[in-house]
Amino acid sequence: MHRELDEAVATAYGWPADLADDEILKRLLDLNLARAAAQVATR
């Protein structure tokens, strides 16, 4: 199931399906930080 979830996330974000777990987490964190910064900037 973990592999299927990783593949679904990769597809949703347009990323390669063969990313390592660490790279997936890094990319998700980067997206989260960018969205948080955008929220702060609009306040």
Image (cartoon, rainbow, N blue to C red):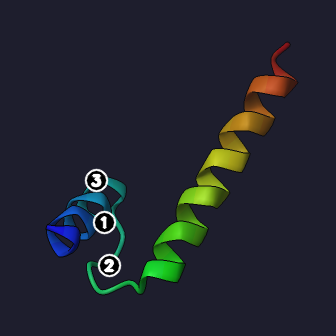
Q: Nearer the viewer, residue 11 or 3?
A: 3
Q: Evaluate if marks 1 and 2 touch, with contact meaning CB atoms under 8 Å apart.
A: yes
Q: Evaluate if marks 1 and 3 touch, with contact meaning CB atoms under 8 Å apart.
A: yes
In what element is the residue under mark 2?
Answer: loop
Question: Which residue type carries mark 3?
Answer: Ala
- The answer for how far apart the CA atoms under marks 1 and 2 are is 6 Å
Task: Determine which residue is flagged by label 2.
Answer: 16
Query: Residue sitting at 36 percent across and 70 percent down?
Result: 15
Q: Position of residue 24 (x, y in %)?
A: 47, 72
- Which label's residue is closer to the chain start, 1 or 2? 1
- Judge left or right: residue 30 versus residue 28: right
Query: Residue sitting at 42 percent across and 86 percent down?
Result: 20
Question: Looking at the rendered structure, which numbered label has been put on residue 12?
Answer: 3
Query: Residue sitting at 71 percent across and 46 percent down?
Result: 34
Please say if 7 is above or below 29.
below
Say which quadrant the C terminus sits in: top right
Quarter of the rendering containing residue 40 = top right
Q: Nearer the viewer, residue 1 or 6?
A: 1
- The answer for how far apart the CA atoms under marks 2 and 3 are is 10 Å
Say which quadrant the N terminus sits in: bottom left
- The answer for how far apart the CA atoms under marks 1 and 3 are is 5 Å
Q: Position of residue 25 (x, y in %)?
A: 53, 68
Please say if 25 is above or below 36.
below
